Image (cartoon, rainbow, N blue to C red):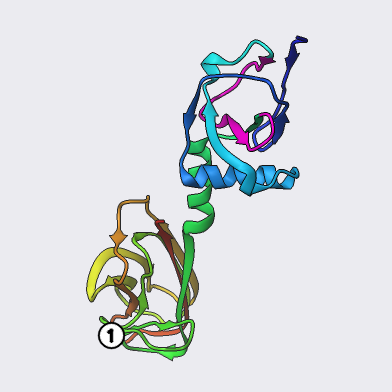
Amino acid sequence: MKRFSVLFALGTIILLGAGVLAESAAVSEDTEQFVKNIISKKGILQEKVKDIKEVDFNNLPEEIKIQNIDDTAIAMYEIDVEGEAPVYVITASELEIKTQLQNLMGKMLLNLGISGEISESTFLNSASGVMGAENKGYVMLRDGDITGISTNLEVKIPGEGEIEIVVYKNGEVVGFRNTFDLNEVGIKSDYDTVGDGTINFNKGDIISVKVVIPEGIILKDVNTLLEITAKR
């Protein structure tokens, strides 16, 4: 049989013809559906797929020659199609698929803020305009992590101390915040991020945010974004 080479970049999808045998391993449901979506675009009915297995790159058949690959980023999948010879797909590896699915599905931004001038510490309003409280805010739909916070505000009357934008979970301060010096008037911005797994929450937890203002200070138009990463 004629030998051939396959050259590709990450994200390229290649369907290889039938008649090739190789050692393989089972894949997760997410990866299986990902591969099914690929082959359906190539005219293969998903309902005809009997099995999908990941091929071992260390035991490729001699008919397939792939050079300089990183098998943490790509993988080959064997699709057993009912009534037809097997089909092979080269695309992202299972690890890469899980990472991309998490990135695409997990990141969310919670919008909070207050319009107009304020001079006392208060909880921020949600995007729907409802003022938060220690036990009133956004209810989490899934387990996950708080991964970022950013705030833009205007200082109308300065003073001593710091303004703090403080995150609460179920009425308790989680220790993650934006801070601003009060030495001069003007529009100020701050942002902070933290890695996944550092500040976690469970589904059903209530997340709210409070602006803490020292006495004698006047602010205007507080806009805050809270980034969360939900788990599947």
Q: Which residues are the magenta region?
A: 64-85
Q: Is residue 99 visible?
A: no
Quarter occupied by residue 20: top right
- Residue that carries the numbered disc 1 in the rendered image: 215
Quarter occupied by residue 39: top right
Where in the figure is residue 89, as x and y percent of width and height? 65, 33
Label 1: few (<14), some (14–19) or many (≥20) C-alpha neighbours in 10 Å: few
Name above or below for residue 36 compared with residue 206.
above
Type of amino acid at the residue the image marks with label 1 = Glu
Name above or below for residue 12 compared with residue 33.
above
> Residue sitting at 29 percent across and 80 percent down?
214
> Residue sitting at 34 percent across and 65 percent down?
177
- For the residue pair 205 and 117, the one nearer the viewer reads as 205
Task: State which quarter of the image contains the N terminus.
Answer: top right
* Relative to 196, 134 lies left or right: left
- For the residue pair 154 and 227, the one nearer the viewer reads as 227
The reply to whether the magenta stretch includes residue 79 is yes
Residue occupying the far front of the picture: 83
Where in the figure is residue 204, as x and y percent of width and height? 30, 72
At mark 1, the secondary structure is loop
Q: Is residue 187 visible?
A: yes
Task: State which quarter of the image contains the C terminus.
Answer: bottom left
